[in-house]
Image (tube, grey):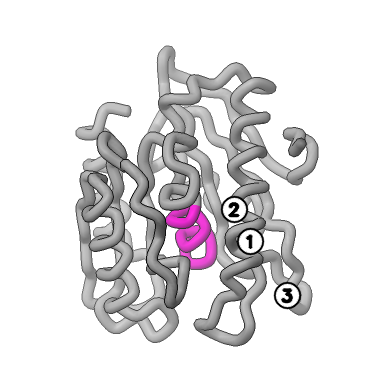
Amino acid sequence: MTAVTDFVHVFEPATEPDAPTLLLLHGTGADEHDLVPLGRILAPGAALLSPRGKVDENGSNRWFRRLREGVFDVEDLIARTAELADFVKAATVAYDLDPERIVVSGFSNGANTGAGLVLLHPGVVAGAALFAGGAPLQGREPDRVDLSGTRVFLGNGAVDPITTIDQARLLAAQLGERGADVRVEEHPGGHGLPPETVERAREWFAAADF
């Protein structure tokens, strides 16, 4: 059983009454502090829960192992995502969070992990705002879970050399086929998070009314 103390993490309580919780998943080489400023922009007043990935790749924090650039260790991804799902459940109890109002947001490796959380553990989060992420189960078709009521924002670069736009579009299709309400925002850049995409995501979050 995973405990909330099993992950190094930052928790900031909500500053607005009845605010949702944003689960923040950093990219490769970052840590639990990296996306906290983004969380404050996306959902002002929300509680912020930002853990650190447990995989060490040559000194860089990650959420799951990869075999080489762009090729995931899918079995490790599945196992690590299950552990993360248990952490979210433990944090819900420890911090008295509303389990039906948790939204995951991640960048790159964190976005892939967030996508895995949505596809493999439906109901753990109510929605997702994922940036520079793609279909996480490379070469495998996810189970036909019911994601009705799950709202997802995907922000990706059209010329991203790390997460190709084809992988991003495949993720959008997989989510949509399972009933998720998906908004896709493609920008002309690469593997980054431009201000315009952040603003579109902020507007989406406010309109979604989590």
Mark drawn on residue 81: 2
Q: Position of residue 173 (x, y in %)?
A: 24, 62
From which residue to which does the magenta span run?
107-116
Mark drawn on residue 63: 1
Q: How far apart are marks 2 and 3 (CA)?
A: 17 Å
Q: How far apart are marks 2 and 1 (CA)?
A: 8 Å
Q: Any magenta on residue 24?
A: no
32 above or below 187?
A: above
Q: Position of residue 177 (x, y in %)?
A: 23, 55
Badge 2 or badge 1: first in the primary sequence: 1
Q: Is mark 2 on a helix, strand or loop?
A: helix
Badge 1 or badge 3: first in the primary sequence: 3
Q: How far apart are marks 1 and 3 (CA)?
A: 10 Å
Mark drawn on residue 57: 3
87 or 75: which is nearer to us? 75
Q: Where is residue 200 in the image (x, y as percent from the top left)?
A: 23, 51
